[in-house]
Image (cartoon, coloured by chain):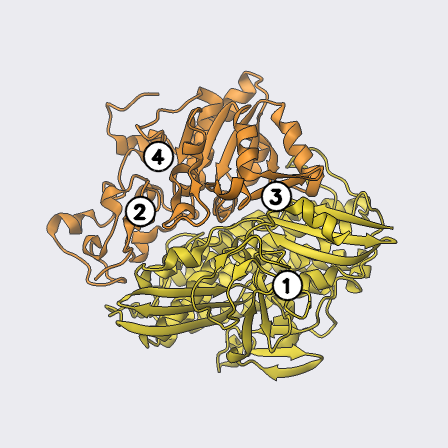
Chain colours: A orange, B yellow
Amino acid sequence: MNKFENCPMIDSKSQTAMTLINQSIDYIKQNNVPKLNLIWLEATGCSGNIISLLNGENPGLYFLLKEMVNLKYDNSLSPYQGERAFEEFLEALNTEFILVVEGAISLKDGGLYSVFARYKGKIITTAKAVRMAADKAKYILAVGTCSSFGGISSASPNPSESISTFDYLNDKTVIRIPGCPAHPDWVTGTIAHLISFGMPLLDEKNRPLMFYSLTVHDGCTRRSFFNKGIFAQKLGDAECMFKLGCRGPVTKADCPIRKWNQYVNYPIGDNTPCIGCAQDNFPDGMEPFVRY
Amino acid sequence: MSNIIYINPITRISGFLEIEVKIENNEIVDAKSSGVLYRGFEKMLLGRSPLDAIYFTERICGICSTAHSMASALCLEDALKITPTLNSNLLRNIIHGCEFIQNHIRHFYQFVIPDYVKGPDIIGSSYSNNDYRLPDNLSYRINKNYIESLTFSRAAHEMIAVLGGKAPHNHGIFVGGVTCNIDSAKIIKLQSLLKSIKDFVNTKMLEDVYIISQYYSDYFNIGIGCKNLMTYGLFDFDDKSIFYVKPSVLINGMKYSFEKNNITENVFYSWYETQSNSVPFESPPDTNLNKKDAYSFVKAPRYKGYPMETGPLSRMYLSGIYKRGISAMDRIVARALEADKIIDIVENMLNMLEILPSNQDIYEIPDIAIGAGLTDTTRGSLAHYISIKDKKIEKYDIITPSTWNLSSRSENGTRGPVENALIGTYISSLSSPVEIGRIVRSFDPCISCATHVAVKDKKPIDFIIDIL
């Protein structure tokens, strides 16, 4: 799969989530491979990544769950509740599964600022549930910026004493899929790659190169304005927003090429600067988001 | 003989929630709702650039992020003395309206349906509770629509992205209105997407809601709650074709206009060290897990001292559109009817748009200012308050809809609306108390929002012994 000697932008374009997914479905069918299970845990965050996943199209959620993986647990979608829901989680741990964690891991007061379940009278913190699952997972994905880098959940002064899932599981190989939220293609595309080809090529921060090899600035639709030194004065203007505080030059993500929500738009296309939401020092190192 | 039942996690909501009920002779005699997730946004916001509050507070909640961008923008405009043009205001109300549509479709199909209909089997092993009443053909129909609904909730977020860059966490709503420059291509795209959503809601969703309400008509008699209703107003335009509801309250059966100075936020039973009940708070209170009598970190907002239910049923009732009553099933029915109502309003707003550039400006941040942004949003009444000093955020206070609905007791012991709605409910099977989840979910709780300042009881086991 290493075509890195070619133009990385062309790679990003050709390796869309859908082509990967078609490859993985062919692979599943031709090789009679059983579908992998998926456990999706929402930790200390806003649950925006599962909502973003629901926004996916080609593949959509239904396709993902029908053709690619068996979703064994997710707090937002599970039909169960209470102890029965936790038992579903426990049963899934005895299978071969991909673990997705969205949100950061809150460590304050023994993890009691983020509680996953109460089982047989005992409080199971989210930190504990993530550890239980990580110890048995075949692959681990930290989805979203909170899970990848701490993100907004660990913003100064970090009242919940949160750290990233990546740092919390520092004894494991964790793939980072940052973004606030993560684009659904980044998640399903990575899962598709894991199914058919195993580990994707990762950069030095464990991000899949197929989605994070370029900065937003590299592929920006307003790059020619930057090159000519024509800058926007305020939001709503059509020119380069570098001087308004755009973080595109330091943010690795393929937003300008891929675009969001059925590929219709992205923040710069909406006349607002990139705020660097997929980068490791978001939000504290990316502020102010807007300056004049 | 009494039993204590805990349900944790309450799944199919946004965020983490524990419900604890005390049951005697199969009847709920006491109830406590407890958010079990804490992040502390009000502390994080101190010292940051005021304009950043919009994109920052959105990230309180992944399912209703547009709500926070809306309230935060209103709050900043109040502080900066800025009034958006009508066209900009329409555009951002279209964005906000689409967030309602996305939420209401997802809440009904993905969050509510599994309580009433067996299947669809796309998640986990085959689930069953002991109270599924639909014949197979209707279960099949609704499960098919569960899958189909994913297309239309997604389309509502696509509409937000057309005007706001992306969803969740849009960039388009900003001080002064919006950042997008509207054109005919965008308008026709939005109209086309909205038409497909409208067809689905009218031909599928409303009928599915009707089916559920017929087979579970006993839920019109339970989960009633405090019966005090509130809205900060929504789409409060002079033009009737885009008007929905004025700021108003219903207390003891009497309707009054809403007055924001009547809001207090009580921490008597909450683990906070403050004597203040003023809104906004003087400063984010420090936590104290050993505080006497406290059992929750969810605060207790009150209106004239009353707990208030807020959300789609409150709005539909106070607007005079929905009159049947107040109950768990009324909340579900009113939410679906509201989706239909808001689709019509968004449709009319799209027809009123003019092709004008966005009204953005270079905004000067004052050295000192205060502002308030109150609006109704998907789950009910949302307030943001800001205080600016030296061009930075000095204080930021947020009261979310779910803080109202899931509030803890106030100093006179009055329960919050969800707690109150559970009291008196007959539980058919103690081993499978389906009634509890159904009642709680009828409020569409968002714990990511409600507990941006809440934490969990540190000594849950001791606490059980106390109330036994």
Q: Are marks 4 and 3 in contact (CB under 8 Å)?
A: no
Chain under numbered label 4: A
Circle 3: residue type: Leu
Circle 4: residue type: Phe
Chain under numbered label 3: A
Query: Any mark on residue B335, and which?
Result: 1
Task: Tell me the crowding category of disc 4: few under 14, some 14 to 19, or many 20 or more residues within 10 angstroms, Cα based.
Answer: many
Q: Nearer the viewer, mark 4 or mark 2?
A: 2
Query: Any mark on residue A77, and which?
Result: 3
Task: Tell me the crowding category of disc 2: few under 14, some 14 to 19, or many 20 or more residues within 10 angstroms, Cα based.
Answer: many
Residues under labels 4 and 1: Cα distance? 39 Å
SS under mark 4? helix
Given the current orientation, which residue lies at the most extreme left position? A228
Residues under labels 2 and 3: Cα distance? 29 Å
SS under mark 2? loop
- Residue B332 seen by the camera: no
Q: Nearer the viewer, residue B255 or B277?
A: B277
Q: Nearer the viewer, mark 4 or mark 3?
A: 3
Q: Are marks 1 and 3 in contact (CB under 8 Å)?
A: no
Depicted A30 relative to depicted B124: above or below = above
Please give the name of the residue rendered at 49% of the width and 24% of the height, measured from the top-left corner: A195
Q: Which residue is mark 4?
A: A211
Q: Nearer the viewer, residue B172 or B453?
A: B453
The quadrant holding residue B313 is: bottom right
Percent coordinates x, y for residue B250 in the rendering: 65, 78
Circle nearer the N terminus (4, 2): 4
Q: Nearer the viewer, residue A233 or B345?
A: A233
Left or right for B124, reference A165: right
Same chain letter for marks 2 and 3: yes
Q: Are marks 2 and 1 in contact (CB under 8 Å)?
A: no
Depicted B37 relative to depicted A253: above or below = below
SS under mark 3? loop
